[in-house]
Amino acid sequence: MANIREIQTRINSVKDTMKITNAMYMISSTKMRQAKKKLTDSEPYFYGLQGEISRILRHIPEIEHRYFDAREEIPKEKRKIGSIVITADKGLAGAYNHNIVKVEDEILEEPGAHKLFVVGELGRHYYANKGVEIDTNFLYTVQKPTMHRARDIAEVILSQYERGELDEVYIVYTRMENSMLTTVEKMKILPLERSSFNEMKMPLSIHREAIALYPSAEAVLDSIVPNYVVGMIYGCLVEAYASEHNARMTAMQSATDSAQEIIKDLSIIYNRARQAAITQEITEVCAGAKAQKRKRK
């Protein structure tokens, strides 16, 4: 059994660690709430864009546009597939990063020429070590997602798609269902699918006036779709950021609970050692007193 001083030192060390985990929990909690508020504030605008695209497709169902071109003439094994993978910049978030790269690894096993666009330091290190090709100009952090960063990402993706360097683009991110459940989502960004705009359900209280598409419906889509893609990417960035901090909150809470259990067990050991030390001292005092009595006799 360790001596009292060693046990006390370990208890103090665990308490110091628990202070850190508590602080990280509070920081992640604040950042998660801020991220969810930013997403809520921006949602009406992008839902409006989605509604306008749905109206155009509903009124002009025969319209053809490059952002809706599935390029079906290209066989699967020759298709150029891009994946935007959103990981964290650091660990201490449980299985958050592992779950993301697991889904992306499944995508990489599918037929076709794959190209990765990784957001987050851990994801870049992981795929660099595996020897997977990564767009080296795509160096973005996941901290504090902004609309400007989403526009930069969308510009890169849209330009490569228009030049034929990409035939499909997916984004892999983590969506937070609630405070206890997060799921890794694989969402197709390009080409857009008409079916995803067929189920738009607008509130009855919203007035829909007649629209004029000037100079043409194609030109309107040229303007609306890039902004819609920006909104999709921004939403995924914010969702992933909130999910990361939610995962970190869970991990830090678990670490804090474990620290409390360790302190509880160490306190019991400390008290036993202290009682044993006191008992030994009392025994030595009694033995010394008896020895003195014998000498006097």
Image (cartoon, rainbow, N blue to C red):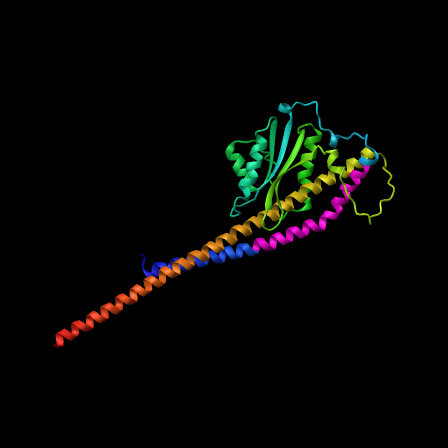
Q: Quadrant of the N terminus?
A: bottom left
Give the residue at the far bottom of this rendering.
296
**Quick one: 131 or 85, which is closer to the camera?**
85
Q: Which residue is at a point 52% across and 50% down the rendered structure image?
A: 251
Q: Position of residue 46 (x, y in %)?
A: 74, 44
- Return the residue nearer the eye: 258 or 169: 258
Q: Position of residue 148 (x, y in %)?
A: 68, 44
Image: magenta residue range? 27-56
Can residue 31 be found in the magenta stretch? yes
Residue 101 position within the rendered picture, expressed as x and y whole percent measured from the top left: 55, 37
Q: Residue at x 64, y 53 (%)?
A: 34
Is 2 part of what is drawn in magenta? Answer: no
Q: Look at the picture and state if 277 lies above or below 57.
A: below
Q: In which quadrant of the rendered image does the C terminus lie?
A: bottom left
Q: Image quarter for residue 47?
A: top right
Q: How many marks?
A: 0
The residue lying at 55 percent from left, 37 percent from top is 102
Name the one closer to the observer, 232 or 125.
232
Q: What x and y, as percent, mark residue 25?
A: 54, 55
The answer to whether residue 5 is above or below residue 54 is below
Measured along the vertical axis of the image, is residue 24 above or below residue 73?
Answer: below
Residue lying at the far left of the rendered structure: 297
Chief secondary structure of the magenta portion? helix
Position above or below: 128 against 90: above
Residue at screen point 64% across, 44% down: 237
Residue 78 seen anywhere in this rendered image of the structure: yes
| Visible residue check, residue 143 | no
